[in-house]
Image: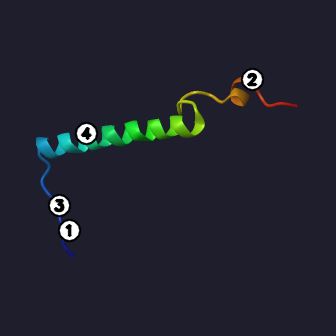
Amino acid sequence: MRTVAASPTYESLGILAVIVAIRTFLSFSLELEITGRWPWQKTAEAATGPRE
């Protein structure tokens, strides 16, 4: 079996970096829209401790 692979060039690496940046931005934006907070922010319960 042979695999199909393209030799990496600076242009293809640049395109890959742009795609990764766009996907990361969209992921953070979606997380903010769904939960109303950034992924690295703690929830209110985690910041104050569990309720008894």
**Which residue has dot 2 on it?**
48
Q: Secondary structure at mark 2?
A: helix
**Which residue has dot 1 on it?**
3
Instruction: Tell me which label, 3 or 4, sits earlier in the chain.
Output: 3
In which quarter of the view is residue 52 placed? top right
Tag 2: amino acid: Thr
Q: Secondary structure at mark 1?
A: loop
Q: Position of residue 36 (x, y in %)?
A: 58, 32
Q: Which of 33/1 is in front? A: 33
Q: Nearer the viewer, mark 1 or mark 4?
A: 4
Instruction: Tell me which label, 1 or 4, sits earlier in the chain.
Output: 1
* Number of other residues with Cα within 10 Å of mark 1, as a class: few under 14, some 14 to 19, many 20 or more: few
Say whether residue 12 is left or right of residue 36. left
Q: Nearer the viewer, mark 2 or mark 1?
A: 2
**Which residue has dot 3 on it?**
5
Quarter of the picture holding the N terminus: bottom left
Question: Which residue lies most toward the right here?
Answer: 52
Q: How many numbered discs sit on the rendered protein? A: 4
**Could you tell me if the residues under marks 2 and 1 are in contact, i.e. CB atoms within 8 Å?**
no
**Which residue has dot 4 on it?**
18
Instruction: Tell me which label, 4 or 2, sits earlier in the chain.
Output: 4
Tag 3: amino acid: Ala
Q: CA distance from mark 2 to mark 1?
A: 53 Å
